[in-house]
Image (tube, rainbow, N blue to C red):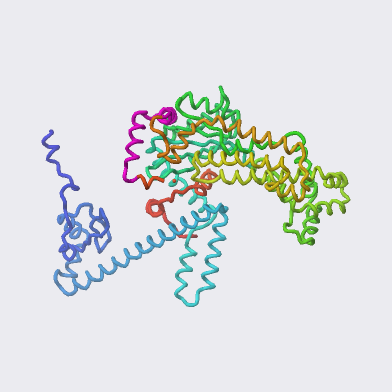
Amino acid sequence: MSLSKSLKRKVEVENRSFNEEWTDKYAFIMPSFSKAKPVCLICNEMVAVPKEYNLRRHHLTKHTTFSQSYPEKSEARRIIMSTLKAGYARATGIITRTSTEQERATSASLQAVWVLTKNNKAFATSGVFKECMVAVLEELATDKSMDRIVASVKQVPLSASTTARRVHVLSEDVQQLVLDEVKKAEHISVAIDESTDTTDISQLSVFVRYFDGKDFKEELLALIPLEGNTTGEIIFEKVEELFKKHGLLLQKVNLIVTDGAPAMAGKNRGMVSRFKNVAPKTNALHCLIHQSVLCAKLSGDLKDVMDKTMKIINFIRGNSSTQHRLFRKFVLESDATHDDLLFHNDVRWLSKGKALERFIELRDQVVEFVKQSKSKGAADYLCIMQDKTYMSNVAFLADIFSHLNALNLQLQGKEKSVVNLVEKLDAFRRKLDLFNTDLISGKLLHFNTLKTVGESNVTRNMKQFMTQLRENFSTRFDDFAITRDVLEFVRDPFSISLVGEFSANAKKLLQLDEVAIQIQLIDMRQSPARCKLLSGSLEDCLRISLTAVKPDIKRLVSEGKCNFSH
């Protein structure tokens, strides 16, 4: 039995090749593509095995009169074989050409969708984009040579529904490339934030930062909708489910960053505490940008000043569309540098400073407009605007929030390490000391708006706010979770003492062997390369918009079905 199995022949191991003489003998041809089978030029049927017996049997059984009508080696046989070969070449050429054109159209569609989605454009925009391309090409076409290009553009599928499918395909490819790299990384850090969208659905965004062997990368791991409650338990279950789905280990997470909300950072029932129960060595951090915003939270009289300012803005912009139009017309006629006031939204970190700055710049127009207004409450708002102390406080808030906005912008953006953020925060803390001294002295070198608009009127509330702001920054960032020597090592590994506490601190943070750290640090300092040591659809769109990874469009085209636009 075993002998019969070993002697059993298999077609794929016999290395049978097609003999070119069989074309004239039996009217068969072997196509050039891989794993092709012999094709009869007369009836276009295929024979499974390229064996002479099989071809001869097919020819004699199904085309018995062919050899009689066209005897072998005759002129008639030569002519008919040439005709059959040419017909087969034309047929296969049309199929190949059509397939190639469809692939190009699909590739162009994917490229266009990629660019549009990277620029945060709606799905329906792709159809308009196609119309624009056709209109431009038709306008530039000076001869018939452009007709084929215009026709090709018209064949590119870019409808809204097609775009939605393309976005999903591109997003899946990007996500898989990211996951492949994340799985290879030894350690990863994640940033988790929960925010409610315009449809009142809470969206949980999960970002991952990792080292791919060459550079540090930051990518969106997932955007998870939370349609019910958003407790710490539910958030952790969603994150755990995400990691299990993609075969990722929670234990690889070295640092987890959150917005500091109770559901995230609660000591006993928060998401972070539950995460640490599974991965005890994970470090947790409250988002530094979010903390810097909380440091500047207003209270007391200055909060009352801010509330009054927002009421005046809402009175002009929010009471009625007619009043808003009249104000804009009034501003335009006054040749002001801006044409409207700005709303303030607590969710947008920079909006408070920008709203105050615009209010100050249009203060004269606001006063004149409120004077002319006959609306209810206009007199009260005019009285507020004419209060010098109020305007001094508004000018002070505009100045200080301008400085805070500058800090916020420095902290934002990609490719920012914790070291970069801490250095910016340290520099700002020193600036606060300078600002406080400047305010107390009355020079107001860093408070230009207060000096000009507020007439250098420094109030007790301003001094108290500066004192509180300095204390808030010191309290929040003095006890930073990552020790300074570790941060200094990331910035400049050659400035760290080999006999200090660095190796012990690094061991706690990174779970590395302390002996290996010290030895590698010595080896690195002796290295000749030392001088070189000085980077649903909503989720799909967000991933494409934020990613630095480029999808393999050629592979996607080769694996998918390619069709022309209907």
Query: Measuring 27% from the left and 57% from the top, which residue is drawn there?
Result: 33
Q: Is residue 428 visible?
A: yes
295 horizontally vs 555: left or right: right
Kindly report the secondary structure that dominates the magenta region of the rendered protein: helix
Q: Nearer the viewer, residue 455 or 113?
A: 455
Tell me the quarter of the picture where residue 57 sits.
bottom left
Q: Position of residue 566 (x, y in %)?
A: 50, 60
Q: Is residue 84 magenta?
A: no
Query: Measuring 44% from the left and 57% from the top, which residue is drawn there?
Result: 106
Placement of the N terminus among the 4 image quadrants? top left
Q: Nearer the viewer, residue 564 or 353?
A: 353
Q: Nearer the viewer, residue 447 or 550?
A: 447
Q: Residue furthest top?
A: 268
Q: Is residue 504 magenta?
A: yes
* Magenta region, residue range: 500-529
| Rendered position, 488 above or below 234 | below
Tell me the quarter of the picture where residue 28 sits.
bottom left
Q: Position of residue 342 (x, y in %)?
A: 72, 49
Q: Position of residue 438 (x, y in %)?
A: 68, 43
